[in-house]
Amino acid sequence: MPTSKTIKKFVRKRIPILQWGPKYDSRKLLCDCIAGFTVALTVMPQALAYATLGGLQPQYGLYSAFMGCFVYTVFGSIKDITIGPTALMALMTYQQIVGRNTDYAILLCFLSGVVQLIMSILHLGVLVDFISIPVTVGFTSATSVIIGSSQFASLLGIKMTSNGFYDTMNKLFQNIHLTRFQDTLLGISCIAVLLLLRKLKDVKLNKKGVKPTKQQCCFNYIFWLISTSRNAIVVIICSTIAFMYESRGSGSPFRLTGDVKAGLPEFKLPPFSTMVNNSTKEFPEMLSDLGSSVFLVPIIAVLGNVAIAKAFASGEVIDATQELLTLSLCNIIGSFFSSMPVTGSFSRSAVNHASGVQTPFGGIITGIMVLLALSFLTPYFAYIPKASLGAVVVCAVIFMIEYEVIKPMWRSSKKDLFSAMATFVCCLIIGVEYGILIGVAINIMFLLYPSARPGVHMDKCMTPRGKEYIIITPGNALYFPAMDFIKTSVARAGVSSKHLPVVIDCQFILGADFTAAKGIAALINEFSSRKQPLYFLNARMEVVSVFRGVMSDDFVNFNCKTKLEQTIEEQGNSISEEEERLLAFPSTESCGFKNVELKEISCSSDLDETVHHRHSYTNKSNKF
Amino acid sequence: MPTSKTIKKFVRKRIPILQWGPKYDSRKLLCDCIAGFTVALTVMPQALAYATLGGLQPQYGLYSAFMGCFVYTVFGSIKDITIGPTALMALMTYQQIVGRNTDYAILLCFLSGVVQLIMSILHLGVLVDFISIPVTVGFTSATSVIIGSSQFASLLGIKMTSNGFYDTMNKLFQNIHLTRFQDTLLGISCIAVLLLLRKLKDVKLNKKGVKPTKQQCCFNYIFWLISTSRNAIVVIICSTIAFMYESRGSGSPFRLTGDVKAGLPEFKLPPFSTMVNNSTKEFPEMLSDLGSSVFLVPIIAVLGNVAIAKAFASGEVIDATQELLTLSLCNIIGSFFSSMPVTGSFSRSAVNHASGVQTPFGGIITGIMVLLALSFLTPYFAYIPKASLGAVVVCAVIFMIEYEVIKPMWRSSKKDLFSAMATFVCCLIIGVEYGILIGVAINIMFLLYPSARPGVHMDKCMTPRGKEYIIITPGNALYFPAMDFIKTSVARAGVSSKHLPVVIDCQFILGADFTAAKGIAALINEFSSRKQPLYFLNARMEVVSVFRGVMSDDFVNFNCKTKLEQTIEEQGNSISEEEERLLAFPSTESCGFKNVELKEISCSSDLDETVHHRHSYTNKSNKF
């Protein structure tokens, strides 16, 4: 029976606003307002750009940009994260929209939420533990390159749609002659201004180490404010220029975003049927059209969101299940407001973080701002030049390419560098969604390799009374992929040692399975048929019980090396005495090795002796 | 430079006939002839049945049945295995044949061989280590049920084609009213006779323990011979009955196999273009029609073959690369003789084994017999009743259902029983090819679980001079899936221990990666900001180098517990003295913990002391 205390604890865990809400104060409110406002200025142009990237009308970007903020404020566990439309989700939505209509995007949003909800109920959050830093790095870097390159067309004023890095580059080179001078000039200027303004926040009027005066403080703050709201400033100025051209009747020299539908989105059920090319498609047909993306989109969304969360949690462990739950609610509730699939945005979360957000309450401010914009500002969105939107996106993503991680990764683990590179290349060439899965698969293969080919250390030891024996120490748990390898190693050692007793030291064998038990049983039989003793040392209880399940009697485990060596000494004598008789009358029953009476032998002295008498503990392979 | 000796060794390894050939003698020849003949009698009716199962004309079964035998004799490493058409390959071929033509089966055979050749060159034989016994058991049992059920229609005289267990059962119930009395009677009689004849080989005229007389020996041998050639006997008798009916002009009361094309298959290139529905399909189109089966069929063939090899190697380790190579040659060369995809046959290998085969030379006999049958016997194949062929197949597979393994598996490892059951159920419901992949995936998940959630043991220890500290021992390698978990555990222990020094004992940490290094760096930072010492004990060289790649200075490893405890004692004093000063002037540089000068500290005494002073080593979770 759950007590009221556990229920309360559970509710507080699942609704984090109950944790930070009561401690909220006016200082935090101010910080959150500034951050929320800045994020809103960033999200508006981004949302318009990503909606276009996803093959939707621009207003859908804004429809997707507010509900995630509200929901995350209540359920989110990391203050910096901002949920909304992202380039990755837009790219994945685009593939489902091409040749169809907007309803597919909204249904995909709803279904993604449902899949995420199921995942969170099944506590599949543990799966995100399998996304390593190398995969995260490869993924974010490749995404940055893809998003950046997809904006080149806008920057050059070329009108084209494309799908994936290779396609974009290909079409760009084919259409390079369509480059428009004005757009290119505007795009490059915007990038230059944005990069300069980005640097502005590092400008400090006071000298280093000297406390700034009040006036200097004020200027420093203004510089910082201009720097963090640079995206909005650039977009507003460029739009004003375009508006002036248009209002003079001469027409804008730049390609513009075009009409954005005014007004808030309707609250309605996600579309479970739709019209495509004058024929009605019902839910099952839509579902089969969406195909594997129903699983891929939510999983990639979670991976992306967790990768971002990991980046901003600054070493703190994130509650993956909670993030899953929140993301699912953002998508499900969002889909009732015509949202496309949403997830955490890297660039906006970075802006949020840099703007000094204190709690997830910043999301409320952002959401309200987006709603206000939808109500009143849409007529002006039409005048935003595409080139300046492109510049905003490019400047947001170029700093996401994590080349600086290569050096420590090279020094630390070359395998991991390979995983990161493979993820990066596959994301670029095959596609982001497959790249991340391939990266995880490669990582898991590296992880499994020690399970399949564990180090096996061998040594010749001597008992106090001078009996020689072989001790073999497998360096990993004993599960099915390793069994054949271990079996070959032990069998070879047994043959080449010419009937010396063989001891398998199980100190690193932390677990075993049925296949291993069968293999050990085969080994015991093989040794038994050769009349060669095979002992086990220090096997854990759980390993012993797995082995005993297959062979009830034959498995002899010692928990104490002294007892083992005594047995070897006694056994050695009895074998040399009995040897002739045994060879004359072969019978498995009379095999010396099976005569050991104690099946589980421990001694009273400490465990410390287990690594005694071991020499030259260096050879990794099974050579003598 | 490879010496002539290494080349010779390699050639002998890759062409095993060079190993057993020189030692061949007349006694072995006799055994191999008997076994080869018996297998030939089994393969003929099976080949006809499997060709029909695969949607091909019956003669293609025989075309597929001889080349594998010849090739395996030269390259095969396990004496019992017989390569040829199997029910599983037939089922998988059927899916590619439906609505197309035979050329697809032959091309699939060729491409399977090519894929297997590539796999063997890349030494991907290691992949078969990931097929555990539970998966093998689930797979063979499910295959048996599917093959058995697919023969019910033949047994009942119902004419139908089906695909998969569910479809078969469904269609069978729909068409049950079409059951023909004569066929049912024949089928059931055949099964009864086959089962009785199977028992015959256990009949011994001499009493147990008494040496048989020469006459008894002779009868025992005749019984054994009748028993092992029961398939051929039943088929020959039933065909004779049908032939007599037909020759009397009254027509056979049974459904018959129908015309089998006489003559040997042509030697020709595999078909790289074909005619389907009066339109020519070129190679790229055929390839895209075959789709993922180009990879699935060879992989499943290898899995099946290795599963069988594992069953017959009687505990010996099999050379997976050699088996891959042999299988690829069987398929490639076979495809020049109009073969469908082939692999090792479980039922015929069992017959081969039971017939006392001594070397792979038995395959030559089988192959020659099949060629003779194709040349001279085909007119008579037309008279084989389908019901008796069905009975042969059913009686071959019902003994492949491995229910007897359930009990030891339950005792040994319930997880493995779950894997076996899941494989079995998925093979039945979704399909054999997916079932085996799902089984492997489940197995890998169980394998990965300890990597994600390793046991973490914690203890409070005391130095000889009475300083308390916490010692934490992660029970597994430190790779990315475990990092968050370990980090949480250590961080919590650090906080709840109220500034006691924390020692991470790395004795079970056999490896680490970049993600782990980053996590450890974050932990060190966290402890450092709290001025709480964090030490590492007994980290291996390779682990240290991975960690050092990320943090050059901060990582302090001790190879000796005594030195560590001394440091804790000194550190403890210096901290308590400096504590006030540190809190007054916080600076990361002056943190006591970083002042340790020796970064890699070892002592001359033995390693034995590492498990000293540890008490109550039982709590698995991170509670105190």
Image (tube, coloured by chain):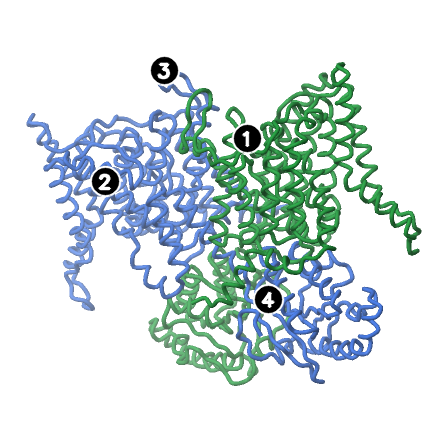
Chain colours: A green, B blue
Tell me residue B50's x, y (percent): 29, 36
Q: Is residue A246 above or below residue B605?
A: above
Secondary structure state at the residue bearing disc 1:
helix
Tag 4: residue type?
A: Pro
Instruction: Tell me the chain of label 4.
Output: B
Q: CA distance from mark 1 to mark 3?
A: 35 Å
* Quadrant occupied by the N terminus of chain A: bottom left
* Relative to A368, A338 lies left or right: left
- For marks 3 and 4, give the one nearer the viewer: 4
Tell me residue B546's x, y (percent): 69, 57
- For marks 4 and 2, give the one nearer the viewer: 4
Tag 3: residue type?
A: Asn
Instruction: Tell me the chain of label 1.
Output: A
* Relative to A196, B295 lies left or right: left
Kindly identify which numbered label has been placed on residue B474. Answer: 4
Q: Residue at x 72, y 54 (%)?
A: A28
Tell me which label, 2 or 3, sits earlier in the chain: 2
Tag 1: residue type?
A: Gln
Tell me residue A562's x, y (percent): 53, 82
Q: Is residue A236 above or below residue A444?
A: above
- Mark 1 residue crowding within 10 angstroms, few (<14) / some (14–19) / many (20+): some
Secondary structure state at the residue bearing disc 4:
strand
| Labels 3 & 4 near each other (Cβ < 8 A) | no
Q: Is residue B443 above or below residue B83?
A: below
- For marks 1 and 3, give the one nearer the viewer: 1
Tag 2: residue type?
A: Gln
Residue on which the image places disc 2: B151
Tell me residue A323's x, y (percent): 57, 51
Residue on which the image places disc 3: B278
Q: CA distance from mark 4 to mark 1?
A: 45 Å
Kindly identify which numbered label has been placed on residue A95. Answer: 1
Secondary structure state at the residue bearing disc 2:
loop
